[in-house]
């Protein structure tokens, strides 16, 4: 799915270098994943007083974790993590 997304973006903006598009997509998805981890954390722990602190800590741990190697490599982990977190945010939002 990740190669399809990169090639679709390249065709959409008429770019020649897929490496730059892949790197931009990975960094953008890493940023979105950090925000989604924070949002899901607030939704899951919303009933306790430290919910915001726990959500912020979990987002920070995601940024400095050993999986940061995969955040800039051209793997599909960021895309699938984003899709999973997006689904969780919809489930926990109750909509």
Image (tube, grey):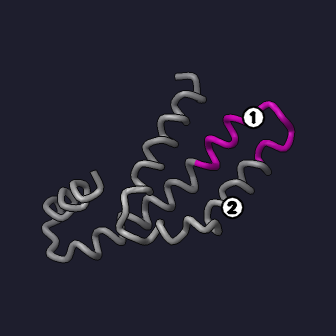
Crowd class of label 2 (few under 14; some 14 to 19; many from 20; radius 10 Å) = few
User: On screen, 92 above or below 19?
Assistant: above
Seen at 47% across and 66% down, the residue is 70
Between marks 1 and 2 in the image, the one whose residue lies nearer the viewer = 2
Please, what secondary structure does the residue beneath circle 2 have?
helix
Please, what secondary structure does the residue beneath circle 1 have?
loop
Instruction: Give the distance between the C-alpha atoms of the residues marked 1 and 2, in whole angstroms.
Output: 19 Å
Seen at 46% across and 48% down, the residue is 82
User: On screen, 90 above or below 18?
Assistant: above
Mark closer to the chain start, 1 or 2: 1
User: On screen, 72 above or below 90?
Assistant: below
Seen at 60% across and 29% down, the residue is 92
Crowd class of label 1 (few under 14; some 14 to 19; many from 20; radius 10 Å) = some
> Which of 6/15 is in front?
6
Q: Quadrant of residue 91?
A: top right
Q: Give the x, y percent position of residue 53.
A: 79, 51
Outermost residue on the right side: it is 49
- Indicate whether residue 40 is drawn in magenta: yes
Q: Is residue 21 left or right of residue 79?
A: left
Residue to which mark 1 is pinned: 46
Seen at 36% across and 64% down, the residue is 25
Q: Give the x, y percent position of residue 59.
A: 66, 56
Counting every numbered tag in the picture gives 2
Q: Give the x, y percent position of residue 24.
A: 36, 69
Predominant secondary structure, magenta span: helix
Residue 37's label in the rendered image is: none
Q: Quadrant of residue 47?
A: top right
- Indicate whether residue 42 is drawn in magenta: yes
Residue to which mark 2 is pinned: 61
Label 1 close to label 2 by CB (< 8 Å): no
Magenta segment, which residues? 37-52
Q: Give the x, y percent position of residue 22.
A: 31, 68
């Amino acid at each position: 799915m990740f190669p399809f997304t990169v090639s679709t973006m390249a065709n959409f903006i008429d770019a020649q270098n897929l490496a730059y598009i892949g790197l931009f997509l990975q960094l953008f998805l890493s940023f979105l994943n950090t925000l989604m981890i924070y949002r899901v954390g607030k939704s899951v722990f919303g009933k306790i007083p430290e919910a915001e602190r726990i959500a912020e800590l979990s987002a920070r741990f995601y940024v400095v974790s050993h999986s940061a190697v995969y955040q800039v490599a051209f793997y599909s982990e960021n895309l699938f993590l984003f899709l999973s977190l997006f689904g969780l945010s919809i489930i926990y939002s109750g909509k």
